Image (cartoon, rainbow, N blue to C red):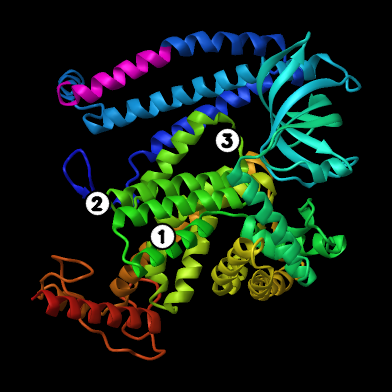
Amino acid sequence: MSRTSTGMRLDGRRDLRLLPVAIAMWAGELAASAVCNRANPVAGASPGARVWTASMMPVLLVVFPVSLALLAAMIYARRSLARIIRTAWRGTVPTGAGIVLLVMVLTAGGAGILVSSAHQRTQQRDPAMRVAQQTSASRLSMLDMRIDTPMTASSRRGADCQADVTIIGVQEAARVTPSHASARLFANGDTCISLDHGMQIRTQASVSPAAFGSRPLWVDDLTHTGITRAPQPARSLANRMRHSFAAVTAGLSDQGRILVPGLTCGLLGQDYIGPGALEQPDTTYAARVEQEFRTSGIMHLMAVSGGHFILVAQLAQWLGAAIRLPRPVAAIGVIAAYQGLAILVYPSDSVLRAQIMGTFSAIGMLLGRPPQTASALAWTTIMVLALAPGKSASYGYALSSAAVLGITLCTPPLQRRLDRRLPHTVSQAVATTLSAQIFTLPIQILMEPQILLLSVLANIMVAPFVSWATITGLIALILAPFVPALAFAAAWLASCGTAIMAWTAHVCAAPTWTALAWPSGIPGALLALTVQAVIALLPGIIRSGAHAIGDRAIRYGRPRAGREQSGQDTYRTFMNPGHARRPHLPIAGNSRAGCTPAGRPWRACGKIGAWLAETRGMIDDQWHRHNR
């Protein structure tokens, strides 16, 4: 539990005070990124856009420090400033904590614009970007690069494999100029086998602006490639475990070879490139399985996210409790488990978010504080956007953050409502799935303009098998370099769970109506938000309408004598406290006699009016007896 500025105790899991700050910073970075991309010379920007972008930076350099000084002053003398503002404006502006929150939001938005603009300008002036803009595609440059991801199957024709890299040096005029540009490397043949995650290499290659993808540059046509630094010991061990795991899963069925690596470490079997690839699965079958997972709405299972980290944390805590470790030591063990899992799996934006959030929770455990999911998510978002502004345009990071926020805010109330009509396990799965999809649907429409109608059903069907399939897959990954036989047994158990997932995806993707076409782009996302808002407000509208209809039906469905008599019996009731109690009315069957007052048309009397009158009378009686 945490305390607000007024001293009120607040559940830390729902502490949303930093959420507007994180959203403002994200919005500022997106706006600055959009403007800077329009002013990018590579994209053929107009001179006006370049001038506007160039003039925006000095303005921000002046406005941002002023905002920080104002924020510091308001925090230091919040009550005095609030009293002055309240006296001057006579209460027409927010005071106290509201002022501080408003200034923090404005400051976060300005910080987002400033950080993103600085990042974009630094990226545009990077030596590697300059080489890509000035040289032709046939010219080769000497580059020093660090490989940031494992080698995977290429998404571009003319190449066998690809990996994300960071260019750390560009040789110009017999000297090496430092660089920090992000790029995607494409290679062919034996080069794909010789390169691995964590290596630093020097090669001659061509650099060009990227045609698609999240990286701004492409590096291909590698020649004279040499390894200048081997991976660190921990990374080298992780690479060995991944290659051994690929060799173990090669003995499984086709669906096991495809899905077990995807569920375990976030890399589908057909995308793996390395010495352990004994036999690639059938490409046609692999493409069909991947498409069925996308259509059924369970493709997120093939990406490492917070679920993996939660399972690892629970196992670490269980082991610590079994051997009676002190809480600080157990918390340090959880942090170590988080870092080890992040090294083993395929690096992605969702892994980064889960790793940082999990570390925050473990530090809270170390300090004896309960987890605060919403606050940890806000702090994680602010930290990531400040250190890596490019993540603001990442669909993966946005989906992961939105899913966590939806699960945190909406799962408890939804589950309480569903527990009344469904078993607890089913209601928990339904509430979690709905909560995640409510917040991620607009982002999914931006990626692909369609709504998956059977995704909730598919997620409920596979929910009982995800945890143990993930755990057995991780056991196989850890044991693969040391005990291949036990690792194969664990991988086979995991493939039993993925077989059920593959069958579920096939069944839910078979109908032609499983995907509903939707408008694309920002209008489609806004339309989805509007529809969700209407659906959220619909129960309240229906409830208000039902009360109004009930009032009219009872008013027009009671004889005049009954209305005059009820005026003498006045005391509080549940439906209308402080007003006349409505007496029970006899049900007159299908007859309308006695229901319609003289001189008024017949309105919802008959069975409906009598039933509503009797029901509300019983509710009033029960409420009155309870509060007598």
Residue drawn at (37%, 79%) of the image: 605
Q: Position of residue 166 (x, y in %)?
A: 68, 30
Mark 2 or 1: in front is: 2
Q: Say if the magenta span includes residue 77.
A: yes
Q: Which residues are magenta?
A: 63-80
Label 2 is placed on what type of residue? Met
Query: Which one is earlier in the sequence, the residue at label 2 or at label 3?
Result: 2
What whole-number distance in Å separates the C-alpha atoms at marks 3 and 1? 39 Å
**Residue for badge 2:** 1
Residue drawn at (24%, 26%) of the image: 92
Dot 2 crowding, Cα within 10 Å, few <14, some 14–19, many 20+: some
Q: Secondary structure at mark 3?
A: helix
**Residue for badge 1:** 541
Residue 542 visible within the image: no
Q: Which is nearer the eye, 171 or 351? A: 171
Q: Secondary structure at mark 2?
A: loop
